[in-house]
C-alpha cells in the first residue's frame, strides 16, 4: 500500500492530541486539521484503511449509520447549526473520511455547494481559517460530550 495521509494522521501522536476527539476499533472522529474551514467541521474516518462503504466488513456496515448519526449530533449540539452536511469523495486521500460540516442558515459560506468554494478559499489562503484556539476549545468540549454518545 502507498503511504496514506489519513493512516499517517491516525498514528501521529501530535496530530491526534490536537484534533482527535475519540476512536474505537472501527472509527476515528477528529476535527478538520489546520487550516480548518469551520469550527466544528469534523471528519469520521474508518480506523482500518479502506476506500469506502463498498469495502466494509459486516461489523463496519452494521455500525456505520450509528457512528454517522452520533457524530452529526455532536456537531449540531456544539455548533448549534441548523443542519449537518455529510460529504465523502475519497479522491484527496483514498481512505474513508466523511466530512461532517455544520450548516448555519445565517452563514452564506455554509450553503450547499458554497461550502466547497469556502473550503477551496481556505486551502488557498484566500480566506482566513478558523482560529486554532477555537478549534482546540471545540475539541476539548467534544471530548467531554462524546462520552454520552455511542460511536
Image: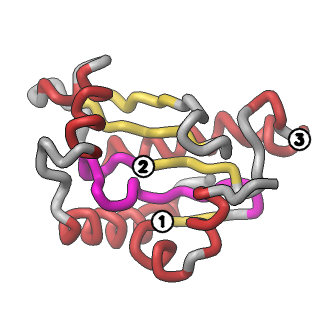
Q: Secondary structure at mark 3?
A: loop
Q: Is residue 2 left or right of residue 68?
A: right
Residue at mark 1: 21
SS label for mark 2: strand
> Any magenta on residue 62?
no
The vertical placement of 150 against 70, above or below, is below
Q: Are marks 3 and 2 in contact (CB under 8 Å)?
A: no
Mark 2 in CB contact with mark 1 (< 8 angstroms)? yes
Q: Quadrant of residue 31?
A: bottom left
> Which quadrant of the view contains residue 47?
bottom right
Prevailing secondary structure of the magenta residues: loop
Real-space Cα separation, disc 2 to disc 1, in angstroms: 9 Å
**Picture residue at 66% right of the left edge, 61% below the top:** 7
Q: Earlier in the sequence, mark 3 or mark 2?
A: 2
User: Which residue corresponds to the image point at 56% horizontal and 29% vertical from the top-left?
Assistant: 89
Q: With 41 as the anchor, is 23 left or right in this view? A: right
Residue matched to label 3: 57
| Relative to 86, 109 lies left or right | left
Corner quadrant of residue 97: top right
- Where in the figure is residue 25, as x and y percent of width and height? 76, 62
- Kind of element beneath mark 1: strand
Q: Residue at x 38, y 60 (%)?
A: 33
What percent of the width, then of the height, locates residue 144? 41, 70
Q: Is residue 43 visible?
A: yes
Q: Nearer the viewer, residue 106 or 96?
A: 96
User: Does residue 28 show up magenta in the picture?
Assistant: yes
- Callout 2 crowding tier (Cα within 10 Å): few <14, some 14–19, many ≥20: many
Magenta highlight range: 25-42
Q: Is residue 82 visible?
A: no
Amino acid at each position: 500500500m502507498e503511504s496514506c495521509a489519513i493512516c499517517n494522521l491516525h498514528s501521529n501522536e501530535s496530530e491526534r492530541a490536537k484534533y482527535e476527539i475519540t476512536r474505537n476499533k472501527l472509527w476515528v472522529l477528529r476535527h478538520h486539521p489546520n487550516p480548518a474551514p469551520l469550527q466544528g467541521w469534523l471528519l469520521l474516518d474508518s480506523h482500518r484503511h479502506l476506500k469506502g462503504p463498498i469495502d466494509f466488513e459486516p461489523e463496519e456496515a452494521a455500525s456505520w449509520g450509528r457512528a454517522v448519526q452520533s457524530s452529526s449530533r455532536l456537531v449540531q449540539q456544539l455548533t448549534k447549526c441548523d443542519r449537518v452536511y455529510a460529504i465523502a469523495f475519497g479522491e484527496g486521500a483514498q481512505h474513508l473520511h466523511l466530512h461532517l460540516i455544520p450548516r448555519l442558515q445565517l452563514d452564506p459560506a455554509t450553503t450547499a455547494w458554497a461550502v466547497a468554494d469556502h473550503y477551496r478559499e481556505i486551502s488557498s489562503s484566500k480566506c482566513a481559517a478558523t482560529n486554532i484556539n477555537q478549534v482546540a476549545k471545540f475539541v476539548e468540549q467534544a471530548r467531554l460530550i462524546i462520552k454520552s454518545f455511542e460511536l
